[in-house]
Image: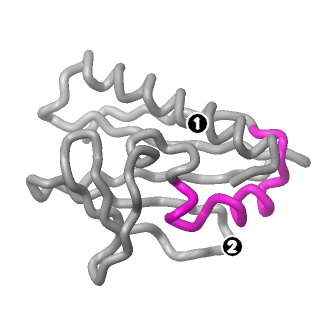
Amino acid sequence: MYRSETISVSVAREADDLYEAFWRPECFTSWASGLSKSVLRRGDDGWHADGPEGPITIRFSDHNAFGVMDHWVVLADGRVVYIPLRVIPNDAASLVMLTLFQFPDMSDEQFGKDADWVRRDLETLKSVAEQGGR
């Protein structure tokens, strides 16, 4: 079992509206800094981008009624990183939750850096969403 941490942010925007604004793969670049410097290109096997450590392929969960925005990142070396991401209703607002896993080849220091990176990205999503953007 991998160590994990679920990181969340509250967003002052209704969950269904937030999900509809951000679920599309091309919208991830507005807040996910690992992709924001890249252009997502649709391919037969998913979406392609230039990640921080080289080319990546990303598969996204299909549009759904449950606020699920999971994605699977295939790294250049073939490893697959699963990233569970949810938009949860919280009264007239939302909770956005991302679970980060620490894989065996990842140091505690790197895991901490990745968690900090996720927090920054979720704060960016919050900022963009609360300003009415996507």
Give residue 65's mark.
2
Where residue 14 appears, x then y in whole percent?
84, 53
Secondary element under disc 2, as helix, strand or loop, is: loop
- Looking at the image, residue 12 sits to the left or right of residue 54; the answer is right
Range drawn in magenta: 11-28
Find out whether the residues at labels 2 and 1 contact each other: C-beta distance under 8 Å. no
Instruction: Say whether residue 62 is magenta.
Output: no
Q: Which residue is drawn at 74% across and 46% down?
A: 129
Single out the residue that lies furthest toward the right.
Answer: 92
From this view, report whether residue 86 is shown above or below residue 26.
Answer: above
Q: Residue at x 14, y 54 (%)?
A: 76
Where residue 131 appears, x then y in whole percent?
81, 42
From this view, report whether residue 95 is shown above or below residue 76.
Answer: above
Quadrant of image for the N terminus: top left
Quadrant of image for the C terminus: bottom right
Give the residue type at disc 2.
Ala
Which quarter of the picture shows residue 105? Answer: top left
Q: Main secondary structure of the magenta part?
A: helix
Looking at the image, is mark 2 or mark 1 nearer the viewer?
1
Q: Name the residue under label 1.
A: 122
Secondary element under disc 1, as helix, strand or loop, is: helix
